Amino acid sequence: MAMQPIDLQAIFSQMDKVGKNQASLREGLQIQEALQQQQSQKKLEENVQSVNQAQEMGQEAEKIKDDGKRNPTPGGNRKNPREENEENELKAEVDKPELIRDPALGRNIDISG
C-alpha cells in the first residue's frame, strides 16, 4: 500500500504528540520505580527498628531430657563447663564398681576412747 502525501501530512502533524506520549510513559515508569524503592526502603527501616517476635521452635524446644534439663538449641552445640563437669561425674560414677555402704557409717561418734 502506497503512502499518499496527505497521509504523510497527518503523520507529521501527530509526531510531536507521539513523542510527548512516549516521554511521559518513560517518566511514569521512572517515577513508579522510585516510589517502589522508597517504599521498600521504608519497610526495611521499620523492620530494623521494630522488635521481632520470637519464632516457635516446634516440638524440639518442648522436649525435656531425662535429667530434667531442656534440649539445647539445634545450632548451639556448646555446653556450659558446669554441665560438662556434671556429665563427667555421672559417667565416672557409672563406670565405678558398685559398693555396698552401711547407712549408719559416719553418723556415730565413738567417745569411749
Image (spheres, grey):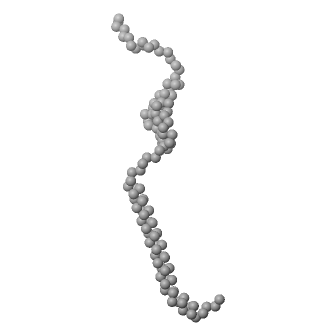
Q: Residue furthest right?
A: 1
- Given residues 4 and 97, the one toward you in this image is 4
Q: Nearer the viewer, residue 21 or 44?
A: 21
Q: Position of residue 15 (x, y in %)?
A: 51, 86
Residue 14's place in the image compared with 39, above or below, is below
Tally of numbered discs: 0
Residue at position x 47%, y 15% in the image: 101
Write down the quadrant of residue 4 in the picture. bottom right
Residue sitting nearer the eye, 110 or 10: 10
Which of the two residues, 29 or 102, is positioned nearer the viewer here?
Answer: 29
Above or below 109: residue 67: below
| Quadrant in which the C terminus appears | top left
For the point 50% across and 30% down, which residue is it?
A: 66
Q: Residue at horizontal 47%, vertical 78%?
A: 24
| Residue 108 sits in quarter | top left
Q: Is residue 113 above or below residue 19?
A: above
Left or right: 5 with respect to 29?
right
> Where 16 sits versus 24, above or below?
below
Percent of width and height locating residue 72: 48, 39
Image point (48%, 79%), residue name:
23
Q: Which image quadrant: the N terminus?
A: bottom right
Instruction: Work out which residue is located at the far top of the displayed protein and give it.
Output: 112
Q: Is residue 77 visible?
A: no
Residue closest to the far bottom: 5
Q: Position of residue 77 (x, y in %)?
A: 49, 41
In the visual, does 89 lie left or right of 110?
right
